[in-house]
Amino acid sequence: MNAVLPHTPAVAPSHVYDRIKAMATTFRLRPGERVNELELARQLGVSRTPVREALNRIAAEGFLMATPHRGYTVRALDAQQLMALYEYRATVELGVVRLVCARASDQALAELARSVEGSRDEVETDAQALRLLSRDEAFHEHLASLAGNPEFLRSVRSLNERIRFPRWIDLKARRGQTRNDHPDIVRALRARDVAAVQALMSQHIDKHLDQVVELARAGFAEIYMGNALADYAESRFIEASNASAAAAP
């Protein structure tokens, strides 16, 4: 494992899974590299047992590959994998909006509309891109929650985690050109226009399918020359750890 973590407070064993998963979703653990359990445990300030348990869970979720007698390798970042994820996302989210049209109450859709009001389209800095990424994920999870089927919400949450990094790369690459499609989607939902909302959702997702090769290439450049998303995720853990330490008697 060649990625080096900044100095951080020791991680509570109960939080090891969250910390390592964040490292995997943001590619702080770099694509194709073998995970060194001992080194990871040392950097996190914990024993190997919680690290091994966390790695096993994270591999089952698709972020790592487990090889008998060889341990864990970080998932690839390539165009073929991104294509598969976005195709799967399209299938799931088209099903979501169809069910939302049929099942969501007018009040629930009005609340969804309020949640997307005032979102900025422009992305000029990493901080803005990070906020927009968070709002985008929250919107799709909120939408899935209105489908009346918890399996859709579970799938959307998993997809959000698995495409978080390419989504971030896309937002950075299209600074100043990012259009917020969410209000249009919500308007079609409130009109109960299934055909229109599915067309809008397809367009929302397909624009990523058209550039998966570029996303993968830009992703590698980000991983090895900065990786602001990983830095942001780690800063949140440090803030939480410091807050817990300050609150302790």
Image (cartoon, rainbow, N blue to C red):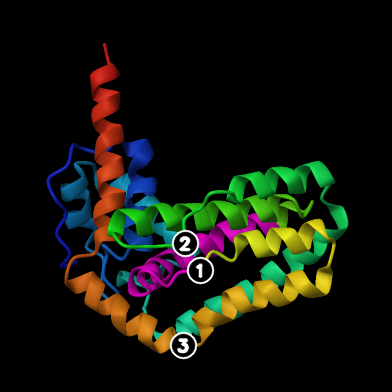
Image quarter where the C terminus lies is: top left
Query: Left of 2 or right of it: where is 235?
Result: right
Q: Residue 179 carries which label?
A: 1
**Residue annotated with mark 3:** 80
Front one among 72 and 218: 218
For marks 3 and 1, give the CA distance. 26 Å
Q: Residues within 10 Å of mark 2 (few under 14, many from 20)?
A: some
Residue at point 18%, 73% (across, down): 224
Element carrying mark 1:
loop
**Circle 3: element type:** helix
**Start-end of magenta stretch:** 152-178
Q: Are marks 2 and 1 in contact (CB under 8 Å)?
A: yes
Residue 100 visible in the snapshot: no
Task: Please name the amino acid that badge 1 sits on.
Answer: Arg
Amino acid type at circle 2 is Asp
Vertical arrangement, residue 43 with respect to residue 90, above or below: above
Q: Earlier in the sequence, mark 2 or mark 3?
A: 3
Question: Based on the displayed image, in which of its 4 quarters is residue 155 positioned?
Answer: bottom right
Q: x, y percentage for residue 242? A: 23, 29
Q: For the N terminus, which image quadrant?
A: bottom left
| Residue behind mark 2 | 121
Closer to viewer: mark 2 or mark 3: 2
Nearer to me, 160 or 128: 128
Residue at image location 31% in from the left, 53% down from the top:
127
Decide which of 70, 162 is in the foreground and name it. 162
Residue 91: quarter of image: bottom right
Q: Which of marks 3 and 1 is in front?
A: 1
| Residue 222 in sight in this render | yes
Q: Which amino acid does label 3 sit on?
A: Gln
